[in-house]
Image (cartoon, grey):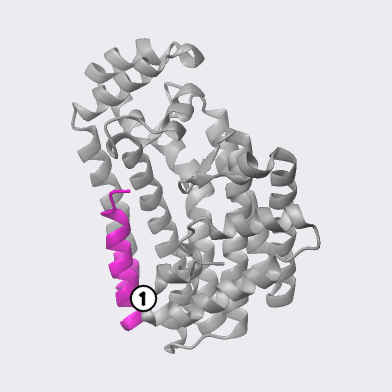
Amino acid sequence: MNNSQLWHKYPLIKTQLERVNHCIEKTIQTPYTDLEDALITMADNGGKYLRPSLLILSAQIASGKKEVSTQIIKLASSIEILHMASLIHDDIIDDSDKRRGNLSVQAHFGKDTAVYAGDLLFTHFFDLMLQTVDEHNYMVKNAHTMRHILNGELGQMAERFNLKQTLDDYLDNVKGKTAALFKLASEEGAHFAGKDDQITKEMAAFGENLGIAFQMIDDILDYAGGKKLNKPTLEDLATGVYSLPLLLALNKEDLKERLVPILNKQRMMTEDDMQNVQNIILDSSIIDESRALAQKFTDRAIANLNNVPSCPSSKLLIKMTKQLVNRTM
């Protein structure tokens, strides 16, 4: 696996993420060649190990030490494996042929192998949990997180083509499909390394706030990241998945009057129709308003970090948080 170059610029967690990389590489080994090839391809496709990084840095903050235990490494690995599994299944559901700029597992190896690969990763996640977590409360938290992720996806599906969807509906779904795993990573790292309830509580809140801001920025970049909408965004519009900029635009009467006739075409929208939706949003103040909302949750995340012990790890998390909200891709 070749991810290690991605964290060379973060010496504080470089060694720890190399251990995570090794753990994942060892865990996903299987005697079934096609399946192993699919898993290795997914692992090699440019994942930045953001969630394991959150878990490790949270552990360092809670313990006050740079070095982390084998338990923390396995927890960080389990979080990434769960994330990989969810991405594979997302691509199957969306029939996406690209993931992180490369062929998706389902496009490369076929849907059958992709389903098995995702299922196998879920079993690896549970295996690592059983090896690592000896507290019933945190076994329950992991199970609830998986349910929360699924509920977020189901909630998004239930809101398809709903022009009356509210910001609260959107936030409920984002808290599940994206922020739940950020929250679990930050909470588990702090809890299993430090056992300080207040630090654990702040890190859990940090993870959720960061996860919400992260998804909002993704939604913004779907509309403002290029002159034309990318394929996943076109597919979302065609299937009635309305993200933050579009929902905010639908709350403005002048924009709503222009957007509703297009959106009412639903699956009959042409690519030109969808590009027109982008133009309407970009010609308004919606992107700035969306960024302001993302900044609000970013500020909350940084406030959470200001409530834990100041150290190199907390300072790096603040830096990473600011970079994530200001990213352009």
Q: Is residue 286 left or right of residue 160?
A: left
In the rendered view, tell whether residue 246 sits above or below residue 114. above
Asked where in the image residue 158 lies, by quadrant, the reply is top right
Q: Is residue 144 left or right of residue 229?
A: right
Along the line of sight, which residue is nearer the eye, 133 or 232? 232
For the point 49% across and 71% down, which residue is it? 55
Tally the marks. 1
Residue 311 part of the magenta segment: yes
In the rendered view, tell whether residue 237 sits above or below residue 136. above
What's the magenta bit mostly, secondary-structure-wise? helix
Along the line of sight, which residue is nearer the eye, 263 or 169? 263
Location of mark 1 (residue): 10
**Neighbour tally class for label 1: few under 14, some 14-19, many 20 plus, Cα within 10 Å:** few
Q: Write down the region rendered in magenta.
A: 302-329
In the rendered view, tell whether residue 288 sits above or below residue 265. below
Percent from the top left, x then y, of residue 218?
37, 45
Q: Is residue 229 left or right of residue 267?
A: left
For the point 36% across and 36% down, which residue is it? 244
Percent from the top left, x then y, of residue 23?
63, 74
For the point 46% across and 34% down, which residue is it? 232
Percent from the top left, x then y, of residue 278?
30, 26
For the point 55% across and 60% down, which residue is it? 44
**Residue 303 visible, this orientation:** no
